[in-house]
Amino acid sequence: MNISAAAKAAGLPVKTVRYYADIDLVDAPARSEAGYRTYDEASVRKLSFIRRSREFGFSIEECRELLGLYQDRDRTSAEVKRIASKKLQEIEEKQRELQSLHDELAHLVHSCRGDQRPDCPIMDYLG
Amino acid sequence: MNISAAAKAAGLPVKTVRYYADIDLVDAPARSEAGYRTYDEASVRKLSFIRRSREFGFSIEECRELLGLYQDRDRTSAEVKRIASKKLQEIEEKQRELQSLHDELAHLVHSCRGDQRPDCPIMDYLG
DNA sequence: TTAATCTTTCCAGTAACTGGAAGGTCAAGG
DNA sequence: CCTTGACCTTCCAGTTACTGGAAAGATTAA
C-alpha cells in the first residue's frame, strides 16, 4: 500500500502521514525499490488511532503515551492499566462535553425556522 | 471590567482575549486612564460567542463569518441554519469516532490483568 | 511515447495561540 | 508614606501541528 492509499484508509492527509513518521510518532515505514513508503494494515490502524485521538484533543505527546501503552513491552500491565484508565476517564469526560454541545446545537437548529425571516434563535442565543 | 474579569466571564485565557482584538476578530476595547483595557457585558457576550463557536469546531475565519452573519440582520436565518446544521453533522460524526476510541481503550483496560506481568492480550493490535 | 498522476525531499509558511521579559498601576497592610 | 504583590501593558519570540510548493524521480493508462 502506497502512502495515499494508507492516508485515505486512515483518514489523514498524506502530508500528515509523513509528518508523523518524521517526528517519530510512528515507525518509519518500509520502502519500495524506488523509495516509496509502503504501509500495511497495522500501520493504518495505528494512524487511524492517532487521528481519532487527535480529533478529541489529545496532543501529539499524549498520543505518544497512548501508543506506548501498546508498544512498550517492558511496562507491567499494571502500569498500562493505570495510564489507560486515566485516559479513558478523560475520554468519558470529553464524551459528556460533546454530548452537551450536541444537545445545545441540535436544540437551536431545530428551533430555527430556516425561512427568510432574520429572527433565528441561533443568532439570538450566540449573540 | 478589566481584562481578567472579562476573560473569566467569557471563559477564555487573558492572552487569548488580547489576541482576538489583535487580529481584529473583535473591536479593540476602550482603555482606562492608565491604559487598561475595559470591557462591558456586550464585549463579554461576544467573546463568549467566539469561545462557543470555537468549541463547536468553527475556525477563527468561520467565527468572523458568523459574527458577520449575526451583525448583518439582512441575512436570512436559512443561511445561519445551514451552517449550524453542517456543524451538527460534524459533531455527530465526532461522537461516533469518540465512541470507537473509547471502546478501543476500554477493551485494553478490561482485558489487562493489572498485575505485574506484561502480557496484555491486545498489545499486538497496533503492530 | 507521452501525459497524467503518483511519489520523493527540503524548506518555508500558517493557525492559533502561549510564554516571558521589562516595566507601569493599583489596593492593602504596616 | 512605603512596600508588597497582584494586576496590567507592549513587544517579541517560541510552540504545536500541520500545510503548501518547488524540483525531480517513478508509475500507470491511452
Image (cartoon, coloured by chain):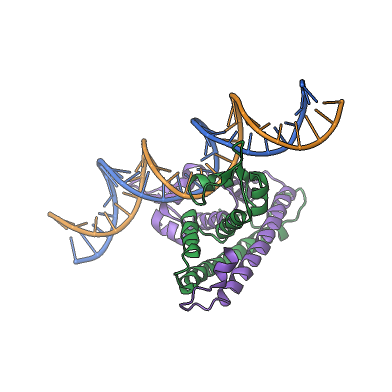
Chain colours: A purple, B green, C orange, D blue
Of residues A44 and A127, the one drawn nearer to the viewer in this rendering:
A127
Q: Report x, y in % for residue A45.
A: 53, 58
Residue shown at 59%/37% (left/top)? B35
Image height of C15 relative to A107, above or below: above
Residue B16, x across and y down, in percent: 58, 46
Q: Is residue B62 left or right of residue B14?
A: left
Residue B92 showing in the rendered view: no
> Residue B112: x and y, percent?
72, 56
Q: Is residue A110 above or below residue B39?
A: below
Q: Which residue is painted at 43% across and 55% down in the image?
A: A13
Q: In the image shown, does A102 or A7 lie closer to the viewer? A: A102
- Left or right: residue B14 versus residue B86 is right
Is residue B75 left or right of D7 when viewed as pictured?
Answer: left
| Towards the viewer: A5 or B18 | B18
Does residue C30 appear left or right of residue A99 in this picture?
Answer: right
- Picture coordinates of residue B104, whole percent (x, y): 63, 61
In the image, residue B3 above or below residue A9: above
Q: Quadrant of residue A99?
A: bottom right
Please name whichever residue, A23 or B107, is drawn nearer the observer in this view of the structure.
A23
Q: Residue at x 53, y 48 (%)?
A: B20
